Amino acid sequence: MDDAKLGGLQGDPQGTIYISEIQNKARGTKDHKWVALNRGNLYLSMVIHLPPPIPHKSNVQTYLERYDLEVVGALALICTLHEMSIPGACLKWPNDVWVKGHKIAGFLAEHGGPLPGSKEDKHLFVLGMGINVNSDMRRNPDLIGIATSIRCENGGVVTSREKVLAEVCNKMEFYLSLSHKDLFREASKFLLFKAEQKVRVQPVLGGKMFSATVEELQEDWCIIVRDTNGQQVRCYSHDHSLRPMPSSAIYVYSGRMADSWKARLILNSLKSVVDTSQFFVDALNDEKLAEGVWQKDAVLMVIGELNPKESKTVENFAPIQKFTASGGSVFLIKSKTEQIFPNIVLPAQPLERSGPLSEVYFSDKYFTALTTGSALTFNPDAESEVIGQYNSHDSGSPSAVLVKVGAGKCAVLGFNIEITYNDVDTVSNLTEIDKISDSLSKTIVTRDDYLNYVISFLIKQ
């Protein structure tokens, strides 16, 4: 942004864009540093000429036009994403674009002062944009559960950055032509935070985080919230940060019977693909499992591969049996039903295969999965539903089955969906690691889609 600001003051015309492949000094709101080292994305700064700004009533050093510009950029991208069949894109107050609880873009406007020699008394503003386009943000170890990209949300298809930029710029022309009041009206249509939504509020300059309920967004971009004592708090973006507070939870079993490495991979996978603005995703150890408090907000319990040395698993999972008896759902990954439920037996046997990789088919798609040890296939009864097959859409062996358990449901996978191309080098006894990693990476987003596909049978998203 500094280069664009300097260029603008030296005579760059309206709409001049400074673009880079990566940025090592990227900054965001409140001077926060952010990751801009992933190639394949859009990192740019745009020179914009506007009439003299009006100081914001909350802070004489801040201008309403700055907020307006950030919203203009965000709305232009949101509409572009909707046209690309990414309908979940929304405005995360004040200047980010989120998809299912994950950041896909951020916008920052800065005032550069009066334009030297301007006959119309115009001022310089610079709008910085960071748009995640083609990077696999879900596998970035520093951004797990935080970021996503157009590629991740669009089935893994590589998107033309030039086309995205052109669409955003074209739509910005429309939003720049709107009055402040009309811009506010448009922004309200796409706002993540709705009236009566529960949020967590963090004061920027120290202070304790507190829970609150959203009341309204006002035309000066202030959000009014009501704390737990019923007191109204006016939140401006330079003073407060807001995040959704989900009322439902997805838990991953991480107790002594779990394979800790695989449990962690499952947790990371779920945080990356589940809508974290709706669902809280967390690990659950044996102590918390036994206490049972988790059942108050749980909608799904996920259990990965269990330690084969633990024989008395059924007794330890009595709280989960109670959970499904009352309608809860369970997702088993490479674990057998009889290890959890005493009265449910889904016949399973090792899958015949020539290597560690398998192709898993569902709907009209497929992806490549790596399984440690033996992959399992199943012999479901008439009341069960096959929701995945190995190696073929029509005649493949069942790789995943949905069964009824009490008043709830249980999805059972026979392979390690949690292992991605990032994890291959930690799997023992593998050869041709680069080749395996490449195979997994080619269909990694379809694998993500399959995770959500299975979860859709178990909970409403």
Image: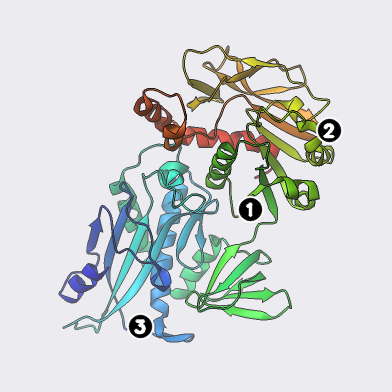
Q: Is residue 458 above or below residue 390?
A: below
Residue at disc 3, secondary structure: loop
Corner quadrant of residue 460:
top right
**How far is the residue under mark 1 from the one under mark 2?**
26 Å
Q: Residue drawn 61% across and 19% down?
A: 376
249 sits to left or right of 96: right
Amino acid type, label 1: Gln
Amino acid type, label 2: Gly
Label 3, on which residue?
A: 53
Mark 1 or mark 2, whichever is nearer to me: 2
Instruction: Give the x, y percent position of residue 49.
Output: 27, 74
* Position of the C terminus by quadrant: top right
Amino acid type, label 3: Pro
**How far is the residue under mark 1 from the one under mark 3?**
38 Å
Label 1, on which residue?
A: 278
Is residue 234 shown to the viewer in this render? yes
Residue at disc 2, secondary structure: loop
Instruction: Give the x, y percent position of residue 288.
Output: 74, 50
Mark 1 or mark 3, whichever is nearer to me: 1
Viewer-proximal residue among 143 and 190: 143
